Amino acid sequence: MITDRDRQSLVDIINSITLAGEYLQHKSQADFEQDPILQDAIIRRIEIVGEAAARLSETARNEMQAVSWKQIIGMRNIMIHQYDRVDLQLVWDTVTQAFPRLIQSLQPYL
């Protein structure tokens, strides 16, 4: 069973994904790679997605088994703890490819 706190975490995830998409609207990958402020903003959104995922109860994560929670939380850990080795290609691919699919997976649980 998904709790109210779990639902709030899902809302936080979807809000951060939406903001990341808005930040990249009308931006090319080259724009992203050349703009450290934009990179920081996107990376912050990924951190929040990972932190909100970590706050989900084990029950909620088990209910949404199709989602790769371990990968999502792991990426947050890399952004925080290995900030000097962030792969911008991976960040771009996450926001432009993985995040839209993640929203689709989560919406039925809201």
Image (cartoon, rainbow, N blue to C red):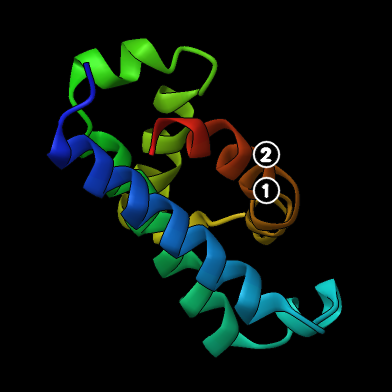
- The numbered disc on residue 41 is none
For mark 2, give the secondary structure: helix
Q: Is residue 63 left or right of residue 40?
A: left
Write the residue at 15% across / 30% down.
Answer: 3
In this rendering, the count of numbered labels is 2
For mark 1, give the secondary structure: helix
Can see residue 84? no
Q: Quadrant of the N terminus?
A: top left
The answer to whether 17 is drawn above or below residue 99 in the figure is below
Viewer-proximal residue, 76 or 110? 110
Write the residue at 48% across / 77% down.
Answer: 40
Q: How packed is label 2: few (under 14 Cα within 10 Å), some, or many (20 or more)?
A: few
- What amino acid type is highlighted by mark number 2? Arg
User: Where does residue 79 sit, x and y in percent of width and height?
Assistant: 41, 55
Q: Is residue 104 left or right of residue 65?
A: right
Viewer-proximal residue, 84 or 43? 43
Which residue is disc 1 drawn over? Answer: 100
Q: Is residue 102 left or right of residue 55?
A: right
Q: Quadrant of the C terminus?
A: top left
The answer to whether 91 is drawn above or below residue 98 in the figure is below
- What amino acid type is highlighted by mark number 1? Pro
User: Where does residue 49 sit, x and y in percent of width and height?
Assistant: 39, 51
User: Where does residue 90 sit, x and y in percent of width and height?
Assistant: 67, 49
Task: Give the CA distance from mark 1 to mark 2.
Answer: 4 Å
User: Where does residue 61 sit, x and y in percent of width and height?
Assistant: 32, 19
Write the residue at 45% across / 36% down.
Answer: 72
Can see residue 47? yes
Which residue is disc 2 drawn over? Answer: 101
Viewer-proximal residue, 43 or 62? 62
Write the residue at 58% across / 39% down.
Answer: 102
Q: How packed is label 1: few (under 14 Cα within 10 Å), some, or many (20 or more)?
A: some
Answer yes or no: do the residues labelled 1 and 2 have beta carbons within 8 Å?
A: yes
